[in-house]
Amino acid sequence: MTNRLAMIVAPRTLDEVIKIAPVPRTKTDSSFIDKAFHRKNYQDPYAGVEDKVGVRFVVLLAGDVKLVGQALSECGFEVSKDRDFEQEREARPLEFACQSDHFVVRTSTEMQVDGLTLAKGMPCEVQVRTLLQHAHSELTHDRIYKGKKEAPTSVRRTVARSMALIETTDDFFGQVVIALEELDRPGRELLVQVDGIYREAVAGVTPEAAKSNVLIIDALAPLLGTDAAASLRTFLNSKPHIPAHVASQATHSHLFRQPAILLAYLGGASKPAETVENWPLTREELRPIFTQLGKSLDDY
């Protein structure tokens, strides 16, 4: 599931989307018995309780909830949606209640996992909610929505008001993300192009996607013109020894496994003084690059 989600959210990293690591859990015997025989009225309790196994994905924003649902639908399981907070909001626009998406996934065939046989049709509940929704649920779910005593009207109203604020805040955060993504779009597009060039040119090395890529691109892209990717291709074609040097350095250097390192070579060759001045990492990290270019870093 997380592998599929990582592909969907790229070039964002998974930790930018998932804010609490998803940890599968099994329902305890006592919790199962309590639900199956006391809190619910099942004709077939074992089959009826669909959250005997469960996992929760806590993401940053409401838009990310949809991406988790997309990943879930592409994992080869039988998926049904038991609860959709967007549909609930449309159906009851004046009600502000606990929110999250609930799915039930079932094995489509018999599966072998870690020496155990999972029967066809075995269910697992998957909850997907935002970080703000999770905080709200942790405070209110058992005490307000599942409590033995009905909470006073004033308390329930306060909880509803807090949920309204969460919706509003999430909408504001969404607007901020859209604005920031538009601001970052040229850099992201350049990173995708540079990543492709790195994969083609640097043999035997799988590029990584660390934050340093963004730092380097933000710092050097303004120096390299509007068609930096084309300039980089031309430069590497004229200097075929550079990709080989990057590959040799990548065996022991994390930085040389970042595609944006190629822009440091281009900047060092075409605008060395400006590259040194704007370089966002430590100065010494430029030294092997300048040495390979036949330049002395100490001259700048």
Image (spheres, rainbow, N blue to C red):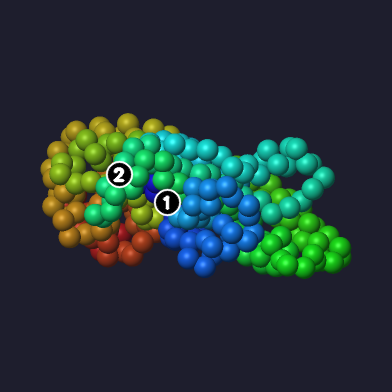
Report the Cα–Cα distance between label 2 and label 1: 27 Å
Of circles 2 and 1, which is in front? Answer: 2
* Residue displayed at 16% across by 56% down: 251
* Residue displayed at 36% across by 54% down: 210
Confirm or deny contact between disc 2 and disc 1 (CB under 8 A). Answer: no
Task: Determine which residue is flagged by label 1.
Answer: 14
Residue type at numbered disc 2: Met
Between 190 and 17, the one lying in front of the other is 17
* Residue displayed at 32% across by 31% down: 230
x and y percentages locating residue 212 in the rendered image: 37, 55
Is residue 131 depicted above or below 151 in this figure? Answer: above
Question: Quarter of the image holding residue 200?
Answer: top left
Between 152 and 272, the one lying in front of the other is 152
Task: Determine which residue is flagged by label 2.
Answer: 111
Observer able to see residue 277: no
Q: Which mark is on residue 128?
A: none
Is residue 283 depicted above or below 68 in this figure? Answer: below
Element type at marker 2?
Answer: strand
Element type at marker 1?
Answer: helix
Is residue 134 depicted above or below 72 in this figure? Answer: below
Left or right: residue 44 versus residue 87 is left
